[in-house]
Image (cartoon, rainbow, N blue to C red):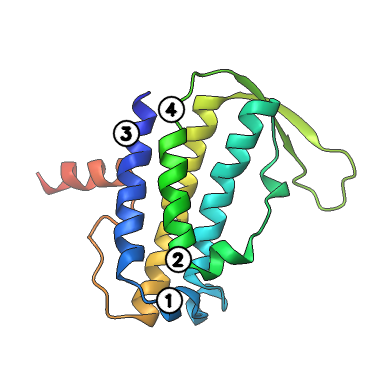
């Protein structure tokens, strides 16, 4: 699956950023992130992929029912190991799935949307990059780490910037 390559590249970039953080930096609240931590954003990324993994086998994905594990958001070694595990388990056959969502907090009944595994992997890649952009903000606020120029930047934006530079 070519999506696997995109996930690999994204996770390699994320893991390289995480490796530079101290444990205290990983859990330090960031003003620019409304007192959220880098670890909370990493947890959110990981748990979205874990929901997809669970949904692949059950046929029903519900990202709103994430575990919200305190361990993932406070222990960067656990997070780094889970990123490796997720990356290694993504190469699956495409298949039809159902996505269960409630976008209205006053609604009682969920909406069921037809989707497929590859579409949800693509969604999770974009979702990861979005959170990496937020992680970048947190890293810039709380550390002196220099991240690669394209950390947290979508591939379409990178391609567009290259076109503009020519």
Q: Nearer the viewer, residue 52 or 132?
A: 52
Q: Earlier in the sequence, mark 3 or mark 2?
A: 3
Give the quarter of the image for residue 8.
top left
Q: Count the marks.
A: 4
Q: Residues within 10 Å of mark 1 (few under 14, many from 20)?
A: some
In front of the other: 48 or 115: 48
Mark sitting earlier along the chain (3/1): 3
From this viewpoint, is residue 56 visible?
Answer: yes
Q: Residue at x 38, y 30 (%)?
A: 3
Q: Secondary structure at mark 2?
A: helix
Label 1, on which residue?
Answer: 23
Disc 2/disc 4 C-alpha distance (Å): 24 Å
Q: Is residue 152 visible?
A: no
| Figure quadrant of residue 40 | bottom right
Secondary structure type for disc 1:
helix
Q: Contact (CB < 8 A) between labels 3 and 1?
A: no
Q: Position of residue 160 (x, y in %)?
A: 25, 43
Of the two numbered discs 3 and 2 in the rendering, the one whose residue sits closer to the viewer: 2
Residue 121 appears at what percent x and percent y? 49, 34
- Split into 4 quadrants, where in the image is the N terminus? top left
Tell me the SS state at disc 4. loop
Residue 40 is marked as none
What label sits on residue 91 in the rendered view? 4
* Residue beneath the point at 59% across and 37% down: 52
Q: CA distance from mark 3 to mark 2?
A: 23 Å
Which one is earlier in the sequence, the residue at label 3 or at label 4? 3
């Amino acid at each position: 699956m070519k999506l696997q390559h995109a996930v690999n590249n994204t996770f390699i970039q994320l893991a390289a950023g995480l490796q530079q953080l101290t444990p205290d930096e990983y859990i330090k609240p960031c003003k620019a992130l409304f007192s959220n931590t880098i670890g909370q954003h990493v947890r959110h990324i990981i748990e979205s992929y874990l929901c997809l993994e669970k949904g692949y086998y059950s046929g029903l994905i519900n990202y709103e029912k994430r575990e919200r594990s305190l361990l993932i958001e406070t222990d960067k070694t656990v997070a780094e190991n889970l990123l490796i595990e997720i990356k290694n388990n993504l190469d699956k056959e495409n298949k039809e799935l159902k996505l269960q969502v409630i976008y209205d907090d006053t609604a009682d009944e969920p909406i069921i949307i037809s989707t497929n595994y590859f579409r949800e992997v693509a969604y999770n890649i974009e979702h990861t990059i979005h959170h990496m952009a937020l992680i970048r903000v947190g890293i810039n606020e709380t550390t002196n780490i220099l991240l690669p120029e394209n950390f947290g930047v979508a591939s379409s934006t990178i391609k567009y910037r290259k076109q503009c530079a020519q």
